[in-house]
Image (cartoon, grey):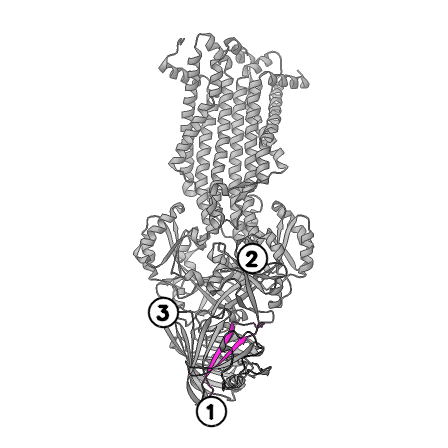
Amino acid sequence: MDGPMTGMSTLRIAWRNLGRNRKRSSLALVAIALGQFVFLGIAALMHGYLGDFHESITGPMVGHAQVHAPGWRDDRSMDLTIDGVSAVIEEIRGDPSVTNVAARIYAPVLTALTEEGFMSFVVGVDPAAESHESGLLPSFDVSTIGDGRVVVGYNFAEKYGIETGAELALVGQDIDGSIASGLFTVEGIVASPVDIVNSLGVVMSLDDATEMLAMNDQAHEIVIHTADIETINETVARLRGLPALNGLEVLPWREIVPTMIVMIEMVDVFLYIVLMIVFIAAAAGIANTMLMSTFERKHEFGMLLSLGCGPGSLARMVTVEAVILGLLGVALGTAFGLGLVAVTSHTGMDYSALGGAGQDTYEASFRGLNLSSLVYPKLFVSDVLAGVVAVFLTSLLSVLWPVVKIVRMEPMEAMRL
Amino acid sequence: MRTTRCRTALRPGVLPLVAPVVLVVLLLAPAIGRENTAHCTDVATVSNTVASGAEDAVDAETVSDPGAPDADDLLGRYDDLYDSSGTVATVEIVITTPKKTRTMEMRFWAKGEEKALMVVDAPARDAGTATLKVDKNLWNYLPKISRTIRVPPSMMMGAWMGSDLTNDDIVRDSSYRDDYEAEYVVWSDEPEGWKVRMKANEEAVGLWNAVEMVFAEDDGLPLMAQFYDRKDRLSRTMTFDEVEMVGDRRIPMHIVIVPEREEGRSTEFRYIEVEFDVNVPDDTFSLSRLERMN
Amino acid sequence: MRAPLIGKYAVRTLGRNVRRTFLSVVGIGVGVAIAVFMTAFMKGSTQMRVRAIAQSGFGHVMVAHSDWDVSRDNDLRLADWRAELKAVRAFDGVKVATPHARTTALLAFGTRVAGVEMLGVDPKSEVASSRLPLAVTEGRYLESGDSDVAVVGSTIVDRLDVELDDDLLVTVVDADGEMEYAMLRIVGIIDTGSKDMDGSICHVMLQDVERLTKLPGAGEISVTLDEPLKMDSIVPRLKEVVSPSDDVLTWMQVVPAQGGDYQSDKGFMNMLSGTVIIVVILGIAGAQLTAILERRREFAVLIALGMRSSQVVRLILFEAVALAVLGAALGLLLAWWPVHYTSTAGFNFSSVLGEELSMSGVLLEPIIYSVPGPWVFGHAFIIALVSTLIAAVYPAIYALRTDPTSALSLREA
């Protein structure tokens, strides 16, 4: 028998119940909201981290995709160049997903401070294009190189006693096979995330390299970064179709450093596992709280039952309460989650404080290179939906057991303290 | 059967012509004046008989033709061809690649095996660039930046790509005397002359499994040399022509090297002027001289 | 009531409310299990990176000449390498120690040349230390007793246009500045899938490098540890067994760029672990708080009956501790199997990633091994305790301030 409870009023009664016991309701609400918030937060961090990880593992040397003259990768022959490179770069920039394009020139040279020559190689770069975060010279002052000014790798400088202000003589072979030589001033000593630049590299501007090596609008390599590394294959396919790139080799990072594929895919899977664990932890918390709170209302239920409220209606009421809590909690959690992502997605979240002991070690050995420990959270609609559904269901399911018990309850027993 | 063990085909005298223009450091050509002594130790004679105690005579070609000159003799004369206590020369080098052709002109001086100086005259871009070798040291002078740089030994063997010469040719302080054995001498139709086939010994440390040289019938001058790699594939061919009288000897003034499996590539050397056995003063080979050579 | 009685009362309360106690303990247990597993698994993931670096030839630590770190000169040699190798191998905690000698060399065949950095190894210990020998696709890797042979990368083979069993002419500049020549027969070809890597691989016997360079012995000893996590404490002790002119470097000093990434990783993983722990704590605390809230009247009654507030607080705390202990114990029990399994067999990603990655995966074992340790006990208990204590704070304060009569009112059902 139904007694005083009917359809619409079930909702009102449920609502009033929740309101009457604010502390209990808020606890449950917080548990649910927290679950959703953490789920979304972690998902966002995960996406941000994976992108960052991708960058660091492929390294600034590799980028997301590269363009070369066919055959250059086999023996790095100086004369296998990308011709008309500025036009090629222009066309690549036109692609919507491309964020950074940088041309590079590589040439082995003999470098001498005094009379003694030592083996090294020239890296001709466009400083503006390489100073972005994933570039060869992150956070680099672009005005440092150019017009005869170069920077050298810090290992290289230490080994040969090269200091800022020193004059270096460089000798090599130009693109025609003639002798290429030049005098350059060391403007600075740089730590690059790329080891070989540190130990053998003399970094100069693309223009200086072009002039010394008798090149003309040519380069050996173009390194491309895109907005979304996950869709790189599509981007590469589009780039291959561009007229200026006809005859050139365009490769995604996977083909350049295939050994890294495993590592990245592993981290991808791993992060999903982590997300699952986070969800389970949150769900456990929600379930625990809901179960506990529902069971603690035993005597309240007993009283209602003895007052004539049918077990079915009671069960319905409890369920509706859970539904309300679930929806509100999820909404709250989503709002906070989106808020967090919105606030941090531009500035990034700094987790370096959690790097653990030995933080100084790597800073020091990096000679002051400011390595990014920032992650830029990113959230997809699918994440939000997944969270909403999963968390909501969890809160609902966690009242299942109590509801079942309620239906079978003995009012007198329930009323005992 | 008498087998002659002689030094291999590439004689020092040829080296001046061979200036790998890859890295300036490698313009160390001439020098390498190595010990020219033709150390031919007699072991056995190449006989005409088929039944030779020699290694497997599988095909009929492994015996010398009747009336063929002595391999020892031919190779010995080749040894002496560019032999000189002091050389002064002007050479032209042409390097052809599928993309372009480069011509260089340079003057060089060499004394014995330890000293050499080379100065580039053409093309204008590189004019004045000089290389000095004294014993094991190598310096380059770059006029464009007015600097002298000493080349570290590790670079002397690097980056020979682009040149049709091997590191083996240029820098190898060869004691090939023990490394090859003349197998037979037969008549060759193309080019016309006597072909000597030399095989590298089992224990030999080198690039070639065998070398075949063809000498002209009349004056015994080399016409062609073919080098076979360790898999016995023809790896490159050297041809000699434009014979002229220089001092008291007749020598081919023009040498062309063509690698076998690279399309459209060749390296050519030509003596424009040369004098052998010149008494080149020691002070020619000095750093200050190097810097003044312009 | 006095202390022991509080205890008895607490126990009886817990016993009487079976379901509540059950939910509490299980809730705590599950939360703790998740947290413990997560932390152990996370540690395993950062260790995976260290393992990958170690197995690609660097080892965990490296013994090298003291000047090496700065100059990176591959002509430097260790002082008394044989004695050092022996001492290092005998060192407790060292799994494998393998010597290396490097030299720049030029490989040539016919008219083709290729410059490489030749690595002289001791095959037996090299195979135990690095996964690179597993990447041999043709022929075999080096073996003890070999001489004048080489294992080269596939890119070099292509560049020189050679194949297995061909003889390469190698040129090396020795210690005196003279050129040394030798023939090396190719006995194995390595293909890692990466063109760059395969273009720089040339492994020969240590003795061959010695002979060619006229530099005696090894330039470095790569050391793989039993317990990489103990690296920082092992390094100073290891320094004592090597000669004074040599130094012991960690892999982070050898490849600092990787070191930076590693620290970065660790920081992020710590953050993730931390989040899970916080979620667990809050979840447990929430449930406990819910339970305790309902008992306000119970506490009020106790106070009305004469119990002092401080005693009520002690009661609450006692219950919290009791639940924490039980919950932590349950948690450890629940976590035992998953942690044990993942620490021995490991979590193998290849089942998830598919077979096609087995080729490029040869250099990296796609397995994460959890890293449990004695810390789990403390970890479990602290998490449990913190959670229950947080939940105890509110009611404790309430108990301290409560006015018995208002508490007994039926206003709040």
User: The residue under label 2 is which amino acid type?
Assistant: Arg
Q: Does residue A181 appear anywhere in the picture? A: no
Q: CA distance from mark 2 to mark 1?
A: 58 Å
Whether marks 3 and 1 lie on the same chain: yes
Q: Answer with the quarter of the image where residue B56 lies.
A: bottom right
Find numbered disc 2 in the image and state the secondary structure of the residue it sits on. Answer: loop
Point out the image quarter for the N terminus of chain C: top right
Residue matched to label 1: B247
- What residue appears at the point 63 percent right and 64 percent down from the top-left corner? C207
Which kind of residue does numbered mark 3 sit on?
A: Lys
Q: Nearer the viewer, mark 2 or mark 1?
A: 2
Depth check: give the residue in front, B252 or C329: B252
- On whether residue B212 falls in the magenta region, the answer is yes
Q: Are marks 2 and 3 on the same chain?
A: no
Measure how far apart labels 3 and 1 are at the Cα level. Answer: 39 Å
- Left of B230 or right of it: where is A247? left
Against C280, residue B264 (above or below) is below
Task: Name which residue type carries label 1.
Answer: Gly
Say if mark 2 contacts mark 3, CB within 8 Å: no
Region rendered in magenta? B192-221
Which is nearer the N-term, disc 3 or disc 1?
3
Residues C263 and A363: in front is C263
| Residue C188 percent location from the top left of the image | 54, 59
Mark 2 surroundings within 10 Å by alpha-carbon count, few (fewer than 14), some (14 through 19), many (20 or more): some
* Residue at (56% x, 27% y) in the render: C28
Q: Position of residue C100 (x, y in %)?
A: 60, 59
Tell me if mark 1 has few (under 14), some (14-19) or many (20+) residues whose alpha carbon lies within 10 angstroms of its own.
few
Indicate the quadrant where residue C367 lies: top right
Q: Are marks 2 and 1 on the same chain?
A: no
Q: Chain of mark 2?
A: C
Residue designated by label 2: C140
Q: In the rendering, at what x and y percent does residue C85 appear?
A: 67, 56
